[in-house]
């Protein structure tokens, strides 16, 4: 008998699910092991977004056990994954590329990687401005949201210094 998707998702051999169970029990080190196992398996199968999710779960566990360096390293890697995915889907889906660039940006901010965050932000802005001519208000709203999120982040402000005023201020 073939396993359906529910069997696969709830299987005891599902590393990601085991990671969640360990995290729920407060066993963060064991959860990290499961999340990283799932991430590496996902990378081998070319499931980049799933790998990013598992790496993100592991990074959050590292933060809980106060290993901030390991968390930052993973956040940086996740940002790279999302940026590469954004570049690879650009010819197929501008909306998905924008979403992936936004995710990439957020992970570079978490990694405190100012240079990469700035580069991704500029890619996002450039693409959003081009799309604005086609889809109008929706992309402008997303652009506003990403700019506001950077302004509320003390570790990184992109685009202008806090003392500068924008046209919208």
Image: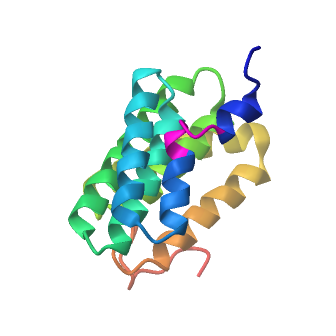
**What residue appears at the point 56 percent right and 72 percent down from the top-left corner?**
148
* Relative image position of residue 78 (x, y in whole percent): 39, 46
Quadrant of residue 9 within the rendered picture: top right
Q: Residue at x 63, y 65 (%)?
A: 144
Where is residue 96, by image quadrant? top right
Q: Position of residue 58 (x, y in %)?
A: 40, 55
Look at the image and give the residue range highlighted in magenta. Answer: 11-16
Which quarter of the rendering shows the N terminus? top right
> Please, which residue is most extreme toward the bottom here?
163
Question: Taken as a whole, is the magenta stretch helix, strand or loop?
Answer: loop
- Horizontal arrangement in the rendering, residue 65 relative to residue 127 (left or right): left
Q: Residue at x 44, y 53 (%)?
A: 56
Observer-nearest of 159 and 156 = 156
Q: Is residue 156 visible?
A: no
x 57%, y 73%: residue: 167
Q: x%, y% of residue 8?
A: 66, 31
Front-lying residue, 55 or 37: 37
Q: Would you place residue 97 above or below residue 46 in this image? A: below
* Tally of numbered discs: 0
Which one is in front, 167 or 67? Answer: 67
Residue pushed farthest left? 69
Considering only vertical position in the picture, is 17 above or below 154? above
- Asked if the stretch drawn in magenta spans residue 12, the answer is yes
Q: Position of residue 42 (x, y in %)?
A: 46, 30
Q: Is residue 94 visible?
A: yes
The foreground one among 5 and 135 is 5
Which quarter of the image is occupied by the C terminus? bottom right
- Asked if the magenta segment contains residue 68, the reply would be no
Is residue 133 shown left or right of residue 146?
right
């Amino acid at each position: 008998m073939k396993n359906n998707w529910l069997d696969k998702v709830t299987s005891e051999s599902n590393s990601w699910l085991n990671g969640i169970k360990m995290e729920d029990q407060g066993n963060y080190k064991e959860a990290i092991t499961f999340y990283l196992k799932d991430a590496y398996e996902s990378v081998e199968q070319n499931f980049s977004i799933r790998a990013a999710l598992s790496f993100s779960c592991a990074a959050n566990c590292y933060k809980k056990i106060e290993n901030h360096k390991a968390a930052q390293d993973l956040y940086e890697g996740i940002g790279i994954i999302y940026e590469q995915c954004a570049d690879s889907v650009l010819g197929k889906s501008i909306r998905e590329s924008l979403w992936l660039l936004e995710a990439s940006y957020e992970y570079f901010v978490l990694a405190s990687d100012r240079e990469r965050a700035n580069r991704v932000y500029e890619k996002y802005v450039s693409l959003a401005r081009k799309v604005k001519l086609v889809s109008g208000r929706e992309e402008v709203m997303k652009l506003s949201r990403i700019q506001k999120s950077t302004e509320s982040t003390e570790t990184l402000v992109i685009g202008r210094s806090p003392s500068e005023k924008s046209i919208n201020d």
